[in-house]
Image (spheres, rainbow, N blue to C red):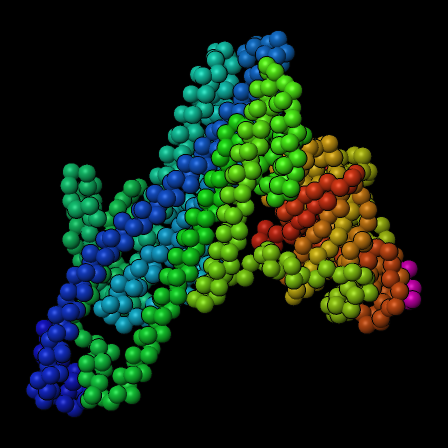
Amino acid sequence: MAYKGYINKVVQAMYGIPYNQLTAEQKKILHADSVRRSKLIAEVQQEVLKNNLKAFDDEARMEKVLASIYSECQRNILVSVTETIASVNKAGGEWSYANQSALTRSKGLFEQIAEEIAKLGQKEHDAFTKGLSEIYTDQFMRQVYQLGQTVSVKANFNRLNPALVKKTIDYPWSGAMFSDRLWIDKEKLGRNLRIGLTQSMILGESIPKITERIRKNIDTSQYNAERVARTETKRVTYVAHDDAYKDMGVNELKYQCANGVDDRTCPICKADHGKLFARGKEPTLPRHPNCRCVYIPVVSDEFGDNELNELTGSIRGAENYEKWKIEQDEQLKQAKLLKEAEDKEAEVEDAVFNLAYLAKSGGTNGVGEYEGIWKDSVTLKDYADKKDKIQAKKDYFENQLKNSTGADYDKFKGLLTSLDEFEQKGQEYEIQAKKVAVLKKELEQAQKKAGIWVDDPYSQERKDNAYWFKSTQDADTVLRGVCGKVWKGASKEQRYAGWDYTASSGKFNRPLTGHAGSWHNKIGKKKVSLNYEGAGDEIRKLTNLIDKSEYDFDIWLQRGCGTEAIEDMLNVKNLFSMTDKDLQNLVDKGGRQYNFISTGVAKGKGFSGDVICNIYAPKGTKMIYAEPFSYYSGAEYSTENPNAWDGVKKQANFGYESEMIIQRGAYYRITKVERKGGTIFMDMDVVLENGYDKFQQRGDFKGYGA
């Protein structure tokens, strides 16, 4: 039972009623509740240990994702190596350091490997960020739930804000952030693969031996990543528990080796097993890689004010008791909503994983691609576009079977089998894709109810509701106000820079894109002085002007350009001659455009070119509407004078450019690609979180021609 002296003291001080005046029924309640609390405290200690193990179950799930990522990387690298060696052999040479052809081709191979490792690193980082965020949220919620059984729930659920969670998981452990350790290991992997392949050329090794070299290096890197995952899981679990303990008023912690003390327990952990520490004074966990120790909260069995309020509700009055009960219920309701949102997120994750797994299963070579059915190979993602044409293909293949023998018969028999599989799996894929879409919508609703939904600026809903103006006149009605405000606050030099850019953008954009004086003289990105053509100060003034201009809504813009601009941004070659499959592989790729990007504010505007870009600029994009002050404006006032527009005057006529200028150095991500006739159409996003690279904005001009 709770200490009678403590109860007597609190009851006497707060209510003026000595303990011995409580009724027998009230004393019985106190005793029963004390027994209940003692039991709950013991259960809490066991649940904390279980929660610790749950975190490592979640980490094991993260390891499975890592295994899939590394397996894909290994497969892609082996394909590149095999194809390179085959091409050397086909040319009559051998994979040898003495063969000049092999040496030349190895350089291209090393570039392909570097690209695969870069993709591996990004996917790995994304997996860590997602996995650790989920572990923090899950562990914080579990501790709050368990402690809520014994003390008043007063957790700060704002800790589950994604931005704060990200800050928590990015905090460096042992001097380095997890992302730094991962990227350092990827650099080491790339170096080891280059050395290993060079040695294989010197020794003239066979493909099986080369394969073994690659496998060992990638396995080592995967093992290192898994070790980081275990260490970071322990750190994030410790932080989540500590945050919960801090919020819930836990002042004392008991050190516990999760697996008990045995021969495998390190001396440091063994020495502290069972010790009590004041919260905030305890050793930080993990104490070493693969550490599985945990802190158990020491919960007092003395009743606090809130517990007494409940037990003696008849003394203080039903109103106070009910008020307290409602407050508790609201907190627990919030915890339940958060848990429901968490469970729904796990459901979405499983559905997305199953969809991705289905997309990679089957196919001609067992990697999800079906070859030979149509001119270009297809995947299950193409099923929606191809399903109406399947029957005609079946009829054609069956007709060919009737009139074929030998190898031709086997060929069409195989194609028919592949087509049947494509249809069957395509139907499954379509159903699963719809399920994912429904679950994502349900997740959004669950997160909104829990108050943790973060508006995604790149959601389909946002894009569908963004402005997509049909005419410059419509756009001008919406865009002119912000432009006028910025223009009136701009300096004379900034105005001139904005106007001069619209008159002749070449002297601005050539040095920004690494060209020296001519579009035919490419020096290299960020290698040319911005003042090469004498417009350095104007570039800086225009940059400052655009920095002042942004809109509080989303908008679609259009731009026509040559293939060179896209090739330069994505670091690819021969865009126009790419197959449809190669073009689709550009989706989700991105890059920076270091120059100012001139776009049109309405459909059909924004210049012409071999590539038509539909650019989604989310709220907050740095860009300025240039039509009111443009040299090529259709305004009635003279635009041959940079100061002709005062930021207020209206116009009834509009120029053919209808220009919106996006800030230099923005990062763009491709979201859709299709070819129609002789034109490539691309949808792309301005990725705000990647910022703007405004190189040479301050200080001396540097680079070629400085």
The image quarter containing residue 277 is bottom left
Q: Position of residue 110 (x, y in %)?
A: 56, 25
In this view, 527 is above or below 147: above
Can residue 84 be seen from the camera position used here?
Answer: no
The image quarter containing residue 656 is bottom right
68 horizontally vs 483: left or right: left
Q: Nearer the viewer, residue 406 or 645?
A: 406
Q: Position of residue 705 (x, y in %)?
A: 76, 39
Q: Position of residue 373 (x, y in %)?
A: 62, 30
**Residues drawn in magenta:** 636-641
Q: Position of residue 644 (x, y in %)?
A: 88, 66
Q: Nearer the viewer, residue 355 or 410?
A: 410
Magenta segment, prevailing SS (helix, strand or loop):
loop
Q: Quadrant of the C terminus?
A: top right
| Residue at position x 29%, y 83% in the image | 322
| Residue at position x 29%, y 88% in the image | 319
Residue at the far front in the pictured view: 402
| Residue at position x 84%, y 59% in the image | 630
541 horizontally vs 634: left or right: left
Can residue 226 be seen from the camera position used here?
Answer: yes
Q: Quadrant of the N terminus?
A: bottom left
